[in-house]
Amino acid sequence: MVKKLFLVLCITFAHFFCLGQKFIPMGTGLKCQGAIYKTFLDTVNNNFYAGGYFDAIENIEASSIAMWDGVQWNSLGAGIVGSVFDIEIYNNELYVVGDFTEAGGAIAGNIAKWDGAQWLNVGNSGTGAQINELEEFNGKLYICGPFQYIDGVSARYAAVFDGSTWSPLGAGFDYAPIDISKSSDKIYFSGLFNFLIRFLLSD
């Protein structure tokens, strides 16, 4: 799977201060070998998240997910055991997907959510294979990846969550999409596939 990797021995985050036209470090970054696969800005709460594969950031123990509150990095509970590939806010909770087996010390099948205090499963069993991407669109959460099932529901490489139940997207794809994006009225899947869904019209 093609991913943008921000590597390796020591990664320093920075934000751009427009008035002074200069970069200001966001702490000292990763303290050990690791990688950041995804960053996400929660514009409502003004928190910045970094997800990937690491066990510490600055002097904070943080397993594969961390939050910058404007002053310092913070861990999110016991974090994620494995890799975080994508991050999204849905129904005012933080959702992460990737290739992982645990979230907050509990078994998780490649998808989990953080409610501000603890990690929770999304559904029952998750997927048996990694999830590449997720995207909120029209009150629903869309995911894609090289999985065939989610929570026991047959879903060929893509699925949609309405807040309580997972459903397939028609017959799905012949190969797993690697990216999801959206416009005001459509959601788009891209990847090395040949048939069926290219985009979904909004409800």
Image (cartoon, helix red, strand yellow):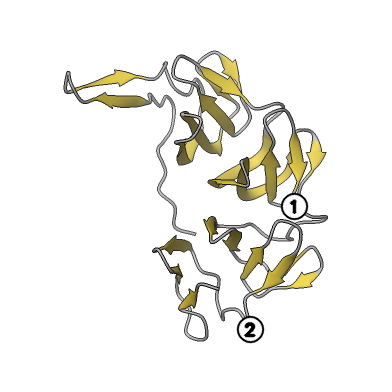
Q: Which residue occupies the extreme bottom position in the image?
A: 195
User: How far across and how far down the image is residue 108, in percent?
Assistant: 76, 47
Q: Which dot marks residue 109?
A: 1
CA neighbours of label 2 inside 10 A, class few (<14), some (14 to 19), many (20+): some
112 vs 124: above or below: above
Residue at x-position 58% and y-position 62%: 142
Give the label on residue 62, or none. none
Residue 171: assigned label: 2
Quadrant position of the C terminus in the picture: bottom right
> Which residue is pictured at 70% across the width and 45% down the height?
112
Where residue 67 sits in the image (x, y, percent)?
53, 27
Give residue 115's position: percent from left, percent from top.
69, 35
Q: Is residue 27 left or right of residue 75?
A: left
In this picture, residue 126 sits left or right of residue 189: right
Q: Position of residue 14 (x, y in %)?
A: 33, 25
Query: Is 157 placed above or below 46 here?
Result: below
Give the answer, above or below, for where 54 lies relative to 160: above
